């Protein structure tokens, strides 16, 4: 677990304060001096440290608001800012992101008003902590680097040096936990230059942790182990739980990399102890934070009541000097006060009822949103089915006509027709894929052996038509140290690269499309493969680069280029599934460059050969008998023509009931079964056929999303699934791989 940055920000400040006895907050006289107000502010600051680390965030808010009011009374903007930062950190701990962000943005504005670069550095660092705490490490990096820019010119002060040390440490942790040794080492070097002047033991423990992680990422395991041990020893001495956990986790990884699994197991027991301790503390903090969040509005009401009470006390003290009228006036004011308390109580009750109603409305809205999401998914699935069905006929017939020698003079027109249909199909598939990506994210990536060089070659060949269309050149560069065989989800990798390369082809004319693969962090069993797709085409404007990865977004300088703007959105989400990010460098009229890195296990050639052997097809099927079941006449004709051109004998049926009757009277080597049909659908027909024939392969033909019917396909007895429309070669390969031939060879 990474070191909690918000904790580090305050640890060095509380280091000396924790030992002081916490005095009671003194009451101020009627007309306090500036010195008296500053004394109370010091007391409030000490109280806030104690309650912040005691996780009593309500008191932190109470003391913080009181302190800000006092600071404003003496026009002390610097002290106002200090307590605003306290309040922002309390909101982070309460998981109240909106209020935390609002408070910290206000603090940054105050620092700008003061024209104080040190204050700007600290408040910007707080905003980085907010994004770090809630998981957006990329934004956290941006704010930390801004904070360093403000503080590096003011590092003579010890407090500023401490702040810079924390920022360097936080950045090194983020980069090293990502496995980025290049950037991580930059900040570890900065820490090394400062470490001799640092006197806070917890900072020394953090430095040893960063140094150990750097050596681990650079594969220098002995040095990594040495520094991690030193960090753990310091953390245990200081009871520094967060860093101890991070240190033990890294130590286990080092021992595992060395093959010392017994020692790693023993260290795991120590790690579990610290994690149990941290979990208990976090549970208590979570309960306190939840209670605090629920009572924020109630606290505001009570604060108003206290303010009124203070005013009333002053009035009563003054009126005590004038005898009888004092008693009468005090009684009247007391009555008013009691009325206010009653009204406040009534308002609190009303607030509780309002919150309950709001919660009920929220649950209702959430349920409605889920229903709408389901409706949207079902609608898109239905629409894509309805679009795919006629596209099957168009693509199939155009493929048949393309091979007809008598139509040679029309071949260019037929090719254009097929390309248009393929383009429309790609857009339909993109819409469906994007719609279901959230579900796919919950699934594990496949791990299949593949050859990266062959994969790139196939992708380039599949985009040959687009390359020729704009008269471009492909430049393929694959480094020699990229392993020949990898294990991973090569289908999703293909989708990423096809989207990037096809985009480059689309926006480049008479240029060069570069696809480059290099190996990084090569180990015995794993490798990080760095991918680059570059072109020298139109480029992307600066204002569009920030949003180009959003859905339905294009840089529309002209209307010449087609597309839905889904390609890069799909790329980004697929890389999210690989725990990877994509970077973009682009300049208008010069070109664009996309880069990303994915970690893969290294596979061996024999693993690939085993897979290849099991998939090998070597049978004779000429004259085999196939039953085609489809309610769409055009689809039946297209499928029949494709099969008969490849020496198969075909029979047809227009619905499931007819198919069951024919299958009961004739012998077939394979059945192609449409899923959606009138009278009796493909599921019912397959179930009926399986009652009297369990051997014949039955392949489902469907235009639906296969992920929605996967379980039904397995349970009912389909042998395989083919998604319409399809490429003819792929269609024939699936048939061959499932064939049960009745012909004697």
Image: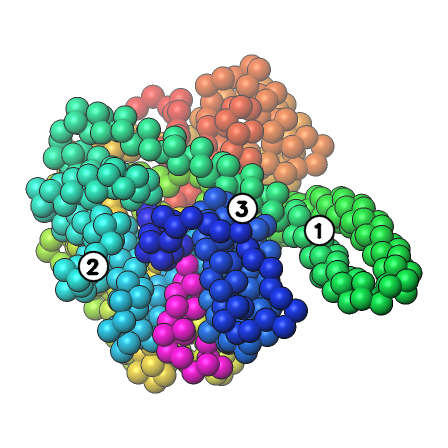
Q: Residue at x 54, y 68 (%)?
A: 37
Q: Residue at x 32, y 29 (%)?
A: 272
Look at mark 3 in the image and give the residue it sits on: 56
Quadrant in the picture for residue 128: bottom left
Could you say which disc has been placed on residue 298 in the image?
A: 1
* Residue 351 placement (x, y as % from top left): 78, 50
SS label for mark 3: loop
On screen, 88 above or below 447?
below
On screen, 594 above or below 522?
below
Indicate whether residue 87 is drawn in magenta: no
SS label for mark 2: loop
SS label for mark 1: helix
Q: Residue at x 33, y 54 (%)?
A: 16
* Residue 739 placement (x, y as % from top left): 39, 29
Q: Are the residues at dot 3 and dot 1 in contact (C-beta closer than 8 Å)? A: no
175 to the left or right of 558? left
Magenta segment's dominant SS is helix
Sequence-wise, the earlier of marks 2 and 1 is 2
Q: CA distance from mark 3 to mark 2?
A: 31 Å
168 to the left or right of 480? right
Q: CA distance from mark 3 to mark 1?
A: 16 Å
Q: CA distance from mark 2 to mark 1?
A: 44 Å
Q: Is residue 650 visible?
A: no
Sequence-wise, the earlier of marks 3 and 2 is 3
Look at mark 2 in the image and give the residue it sits on: 198
**Label 3 crowd bin: few (<14), some (14–19), many (20+), radius 10 Å:** some
* Residue 354 placement (x, y as % from top left): 79, 49
Indicate whether residue 115 is drawn in magenta: yes
Q: Residue furthest top?
A: 692
What's drawn in magenta, residue-wise? 110-129
414 to the left or right of 206? right
Q: Residue at x 75, y 48 (%)?
A: 355
């Amino acid at each position: 677990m990474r070191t909690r940055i918000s904790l580090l920000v305050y640890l060095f400040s509380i280091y000396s304060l924790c030992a002081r006895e916490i005095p009671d907050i003194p009451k101020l006289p009627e007309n306090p001096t500036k010195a008296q107000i500053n004394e109370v502010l010091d007391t409030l600051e000490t109280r806030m440290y104690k309650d912040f680390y005691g996780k009593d965030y309500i008191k932190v808010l109470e003391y913080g608001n009181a302190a800000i009011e006092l600071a404003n009374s003496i026009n002390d903007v610097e002290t106002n800012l200090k307590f605003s930062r306290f309040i922002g950190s309390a909101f982070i701990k309460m998981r109240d992101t909106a209020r935390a962000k609002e408070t910290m943005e206000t603090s940054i504005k105050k620092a700008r008003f003061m024209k104080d670069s040190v204050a700007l550095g600290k408040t910007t660092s707080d905003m980085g902590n907010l994004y770090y705490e809630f998981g957006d490490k990329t934004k956290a990096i941006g704010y930390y680097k801004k904070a360093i820019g403000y503080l590096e010119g003011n590092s003579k002060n010890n407090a500023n040096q401490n702040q810079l040390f924390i920022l360097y440490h936080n950045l090194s942790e983020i980069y090293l936990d990502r496995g980025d040794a290049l950037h991580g080492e930059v900040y570890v070097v900065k820490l090394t230059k400062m470490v001799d002047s640092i006197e806070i033991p917890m900072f020394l423990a953090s430095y040893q942790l960063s140094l150990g992680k750097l050596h681990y990422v650079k594969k220098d395991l002995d040095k990594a182990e040495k520094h991690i041990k030193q960090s753990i020893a310091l953390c245990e001495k200081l009871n520094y739980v967060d860093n101890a956990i991070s240190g033990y986790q890294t130590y286990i990884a080092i021992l595992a990399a060395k093959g010392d699994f017994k020692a790693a197991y023993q260290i795991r027991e120590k790690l579990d102890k610290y994690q149990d301790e941290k979990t208990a503390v976090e549970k208590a903090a979570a309960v306190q934070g939840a209670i605090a969040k629920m009572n924020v509005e109630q606290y505001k009401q009570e604060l108003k009541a206290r303010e009124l009470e203070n005013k009333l006390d002053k009035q009563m003290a003054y009126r005590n000097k004038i005898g009888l009228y004092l008693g009468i006036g005090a009684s009247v004011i007391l009555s008013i006060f009691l009325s206010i308390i009653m009204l406040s109580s009534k308002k609190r009750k009303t607030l509780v009822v309002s919150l309950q109603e709001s919660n009920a409305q929220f649950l209702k809205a959430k349920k409605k949103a889920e229903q709408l999401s389901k409706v949207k998914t079902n609608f898109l699935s239905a629409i894509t089915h309805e679009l795919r069905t006629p596209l099957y006929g168009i693509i199939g017939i155009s493929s048949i006509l393309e091979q007809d020698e008598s139509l040679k003079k029309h071949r260019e027109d037929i090719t254009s027709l097929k390309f248009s249909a393929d383009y429309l199909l790609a857009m339909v598939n993109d819409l469906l894929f994007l719609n279901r990506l959230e579900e796919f994210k919950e699934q594990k990536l496949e791990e299949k052996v593949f050859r990266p060089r062959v994969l790139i070659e196939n992708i380039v060949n599949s985009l040959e038509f687009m390359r020729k269309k704009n008269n471009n050149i492909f430049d393929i560069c694959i480094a020699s140290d990229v392993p020949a065989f990898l294990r991973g989800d090569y289908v999703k990798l293909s989708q990423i690269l096809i989207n990037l390369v096809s985009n480059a082809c689309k926006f480049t004319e008479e240029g060069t499309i570069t696809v480059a693969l290099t190996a990084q962090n090569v180990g015995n069993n794993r490798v990080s493969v760095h991918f680059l797709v570059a072109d020298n085409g139109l480029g992307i404007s600066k204002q569009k680069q920030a949003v180009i990865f959003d859905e339905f977004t294009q840089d529309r300088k002209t209307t010449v280029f087609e597309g839905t703007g889904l390609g890069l959105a799909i790329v980004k989400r697929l890389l999210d599934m690989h725990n990877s990010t994509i970077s973009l460098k682009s300049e208008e009229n010069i070109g664009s460059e996309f880069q990303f890195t994915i970690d893969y296990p290294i596979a061996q050639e024999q693993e690939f050969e085993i897979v290849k052997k099991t998939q090998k097809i070597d049978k004779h099927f000429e004259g085999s008998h196939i039953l085609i079941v489809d309610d769409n006449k055009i689809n039946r004709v297209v499928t029949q023509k494709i099969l008969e051109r490849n020496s198969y004998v075909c029979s047809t049926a227009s619905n499931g009931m007819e198919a069951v009757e024919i299958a009961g009277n004739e012998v077939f080597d394979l059945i192609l079964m449409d899923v959606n049909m009138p009278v009796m659908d493909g599921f019912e027909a397959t179930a009926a056929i399986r009652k009297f024939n369990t051997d014949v392969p039955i392949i489902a033909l469907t235009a639906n999303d296969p992920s929605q019917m996967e379980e039904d396909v397995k349970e009912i007895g389909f042998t395989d699934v083919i998604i319409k429309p399809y490429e003819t070669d792929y269609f024939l390969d699936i048939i061959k791989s499932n064939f049960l031939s009745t012909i004697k060879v």
